[in-house]
Image (spheres, coloured by chain):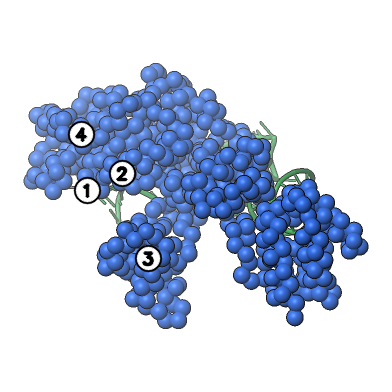
Amino acid sequence: MLDPTPPVVTRFAPSPTGELHIGGARTALYAWAYARRYGGQFLLRFEDTDLARSSEASADRILEDLRWLGLDWDNDDIPRQSQRHAAGRYDEVIQQLLDQGDAYEDGDAVRFKMGDHRGDVTFDDAVYGTIHTPAADLEDFIIRKGDAGGKMPTFHLAVVVDDHDFEVSHVIRGQEHLSNTAKHAALCDALGWTRPTWAHTPSIMNPGGSKMSKRDKGKACQAAAKQWMQKETRDIRDFCAMCVCSAINSLEESRVADEACFTDEVGEVATGQSYSMIGIELIASALDLQLPEIEVADFRRSGYLPAQLLNYVALLGWNPGNDLEHFDLKYLAEHFALDRINKANSTFDRAKLASFNQDAILQMSLDDFEPVLRSHFEQFHSDKLEQLGDNFRLFSDAYWERSKTLDDPATLGTFVFAAPTEYNAKAVKKNLAKNENQGLQVLKHLHASLADVSPWDVPTIRASLEQAVADLEGPHMGHVAQPLRVALTGTAVSPEIDATLALLGQNETLTRIARCLEELAA
RNA sequence: GCCCCCUUCGUCUAGUGGCCCAGGACGUCGCCUUCUCAUGGCGAAAACAGGGGUUCGACUCCCCUAGGGGGUACCA
């Protein structure tokens, strides 16, 4: 594809009606990369013509997510369409259209004339090629809402005016607008404005084939709620009661102050009528349900690195034309081009994202990993961070090569934070009970020998365990390590055995061994 | 209903008429390393939606069918 004629100006124009969606993040990335590639400008603006659903809080969260991703924009003032409307800009354009005879009043709204008035519309999309729409398929559409909509311009009018006023050269946006673009092209023509270059991006889908959307969280909740109710023939009242109890136990009181209102929300979710995000998060926590990651904030909480999220998502619909899969923003800023954006929708594959993330973690040194993990724990697991205290570095080192995400250590390492409540039967049989309780005998020996270890650090613990292997005439470290694992974690899996002991501390290690011997001795 | 767009391994994709009995990555499976898990190394299975054309020759071009997505809103 030929290079564009400068200046290149792209923009990302979300409507502030919720969190930044993963698809929006990719659109923003492409627009950013294109502007950077050609030394242009990447602008931000908020499309809040839907006054009822828009909020400043949402706008702030979107900005925060963009910053977290590392996408910088070039305009200090981020325009809101509501403000531009208040300044009269859209009315001015609408009046011009009215005066020209290209628009007419319809009740208290205003419509733009399409069809025979303008004829067929053809435009070139940088991704999809030439799109031709016959006049017969084009209907007059509203450009200014009526009284109920606050006489606001519709999205169709506002985008065209804004993209023109801010001299946007390339409109990169989701494929859902492809069919609407004929309207925008016609509007540009009627106003005598140069049409921007449009580039539509394919959608990101769920593995099931549906479009990835925030509704998926509600669906997940519904399914889990139904399942919960099916057990022991509970009904919706039981469910609400359970959720409320859970919420009262786990959340600050202010959030559940209005118990009646909360109950309604829960009921709606469970019956599939509608839902609110607060209700969903409460339900998920009550059911111990892992909500699907849909928005950027979800991936952040799940412990994905921003660079990897961006890398993965960039590749979901674009590629450099060779086998290169791992690249960063700098690479995109040098190589991104619109003609390599794919046309077909793609399915989001969390396993591949996780693999990208793990690769990036493994590329870090232990020294680099520790502060990154610490920062994640500060934000999402401050209690665990506090509990670990000086052992955090040990913990970080132990989980570095075992983690696909920054959140994995929190779940993989639960044994560090709480003693096992039960011993995995299979693990007990294999490692403790087998050969006439051989494992338990080993534990007895270790309980004594480990009591003498000082200082309680990895090398000393290791030396002690190696000595134990020799004393016991056991051929393998495994004969010592596995019984210990079961006693200390209740399972047969943990980090290196010396690190496992070091993490727990001497007292806790001895206590857990003693308790295990006591419970399984009989 | 009408209109538009899309269709290569399970998934993301390379492929722009012969270099392709189709290459890479994730996932899956097997083997090796190993105190478990993980890491690391080696290897395997796995795709051109179907049917017609065009051509000496089609994954690549055209048509039809099927499937998927989107639009048809005073939502964006």
Res. A12 image quadrant: top left
Q: From what the image shows, is residue A61 above or below residue B47?
A: above
Q: Residue A273 at what x, y percent from top left?
A: 30, 65
Q: Nearer the viewer, mark 2 or mark 3?
A: 3
Q: Secondary structure at mark 1?
A: loop
Q: Secondary structure at mark 3?
A: helix
Q: Amino acid at mark 3?
A: Ile
The answer to whether the residue labelled 3 contacts the one labelled 1, judged by CB atoms less than 8 Å apart, is: no
Q: Secondary structure at mark 4?
A: helix
**Among the chains, which one is green?**
B
The residue identified by callout 2 is: A57
The residue identified by callout 1 is: A52
Q: Amino acid at mark 1?
A: Ala
Measure the C-alpha gap from mark 4 to mark 1: 15 Å
Q: Colour of chain A?
A: blue
Residue at image position (45%, 49%) is: A298
Q: Amino acid at mark 2?
A: Ala
Q: Nearer the viewer, residue A471 or B26?
A: A471
| Chain of the residue that carries numbered disc 4 in the rendered image | A
Q: Nearer the viewer, mark 4 or mark 3?
A: 3
| Chain of the residue that carries numbered disc 2 in the rendered image | A
* Horizontal side of residue A145 vs A470, given as left or right: left
Identify the mark at residue A38; answer none if there is no mark.
none
The residue identified by callout 4 is: A83
Q: From what the image shows, is residue A1 above or below residue B45?
A: above
Res. A141 image quadrant: top left
Measure the C-alpha gap from mark 2 to mark 1: 13 Å
| Chain of the residue that carries numbered disc 3 in the rendered image | A
